[in-house]
């Protein structure tokens, strides 16, 4: 909501005082009733929730349900996404590069599940590294990365561990599960907005639950996440959601059950 502009606050105060005096003199005051503050429209749309928490509700856009990558393309050249789908699970193919959604999104609620392989090796950032780019306005690692990493007894810089907003915001707690166990992210993403001249109007904000535990609480992003240097914004509209094929040599992660509920500013389904 915007802020009401009052050109002359003193004039407004005098008008209010005059009106109140007149009302008191000419109208018998009615006692306040409960119905005075009851609102009946707009009626919220009915959404059927999933049978279990984490299952997609009836209004979700299904991005991966275990069957295929029809909703995804290769970020680099928009060709068919080259990651591996087998046994209902999507596994990163590092040589194929990052993949992103065909559809673009503004603000949304998203659910995603990921698993570090039980036989993971490596240390620090080189151990089960991937990422969820909540908006991808460009190729490579452009955008806003929610870090995916094996952070179960694996130390690294804390603004780069699992559930960090990469190099921006340390997670409130470390809720990581062991390698070999499925983990979940639930993300509430408020996309940034820009003025017609390209300057920032509203910064992006994000809240994240990791395995049901709050790890980012309405964090306000100072810009896109960057491996080197200071975050900064560039103007963009609705954008794909991207998954990272990280270049480290450790075994690739897997994903399942990815869905999103657009909240505003999204493109229609392709
Ligand atoms: Mg990453």
Image (cartoon, rainbow, N blue to C red):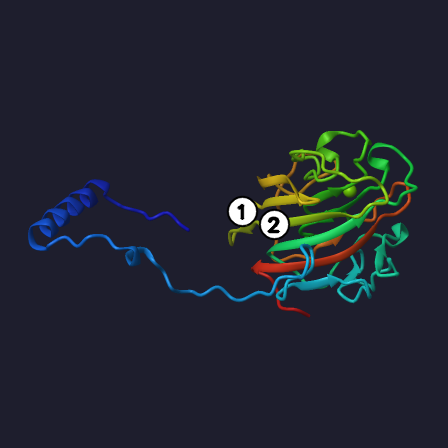
Q: Between residues 23 and 224, which one lies in front from this camera angle?
A: 23
Q: Residue at x 88, y 47 (%)?
A: 252
User: Counting residues from the N terminus, which is met first, the one under dot 2 or under dot 1?
Assistant: 2
Residue 232, percent across and down? Answer: 63, 40
Label 2 – label 1 distance at C-alpha? 24 Å
Q: Is residue 77 visible?
A: yes
Furthest residue in direction bottom, as rendered: 270
The answer to whether residue 7 is left or right of residue 190 is left
Crowd around label 2: few <14 · some 14–19 · many ≥20 (10 Å)? many
Residue 151, percent across and down? Answer: 79, 36
**Which marked residue is nearer to the observer: mark 2 or mark 1?**
2
Residue 76, percent across and down? Answer: 80, 56
Q: Residue at x 80, y 48 (%)?
A: 182
Q: How many marks?
A: 2
User: Under tag 2, what secondary structure?
Assistant: strand
Q: Between residues 258 and 221, which one lies in front from this camera angle?
A: 258
Please tell me whether residue 77 is drawn above or below residue 123 in the rendered image. below
Q: Is residue 139 visible?
A: no
Q: Residue at x 76, y 38 (%)?
A: 176
User: Under tag 1, what secondary structure?
Assistant: loop
Crowd around label 1: few <14 · some 14–19 · many ≥20 (10 Å)? few
Residue position marked by numbered label 2 in the rendering: 188
Which corner quadrant holds the C terminus?
bottom right
Residue position marked by numbered label 1 in the rendering: 199
Location of residue 126 by image quarter? top right
């Amino acid at each position: 909501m915007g802020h009401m502009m009052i050109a002359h606050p003193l004039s407004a105060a005098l008008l209010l005082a005059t009106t109140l005096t007149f009302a008191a003199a000419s109208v018998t005051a009615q006692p306040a009733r409960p119905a005075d503050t009851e609102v009946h429209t707009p009626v919220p749309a009915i959404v059927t929730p999933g049978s279990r928490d984490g299952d997609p509700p009836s209004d979700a856009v299904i991005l991966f349900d275990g069957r295929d990558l029809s909703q995804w393309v290769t970020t680099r050249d928009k060709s068919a996404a080259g990651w591996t789908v087998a046994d209902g699970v999507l596994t990163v193919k590092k040589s194929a590069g990052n993949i992103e959604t065909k559809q673009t999104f503004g603000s949304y609620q998203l659910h995603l599940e990921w698993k570090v392989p039980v036989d993971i090796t490596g240390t620090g950032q080189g151990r089960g590294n991937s990422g969820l780019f909540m908006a991808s306005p460009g190729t490579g690692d452009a955008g806003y990365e929610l870090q995916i990493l094996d952070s179960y007894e694996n130390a690294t810089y804390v603004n780069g561990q699992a559930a960090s907003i990469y190099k921006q915001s340390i997670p409130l707690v470390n809720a990581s599960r062991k390698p070999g166990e499925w983990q979940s992210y639930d993300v509430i993403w408020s996309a940034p907005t820009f003025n017609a001249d390209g300057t920032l109007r509203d910064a992006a904000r994000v809240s994240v639950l990791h395995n049901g535990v709050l790890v980012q609480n309405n964090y306000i992003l100072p810009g896109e996440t960057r491996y080197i240097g200071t975050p900064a914004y560039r103007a963009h509209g609705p954008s794909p959601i991207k998954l990272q094929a990280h270049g480290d040599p450790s075994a690739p992660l897997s994903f399942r059950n990815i869905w999103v509920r657009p909240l505003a500013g999204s493109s229609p389904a392709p």
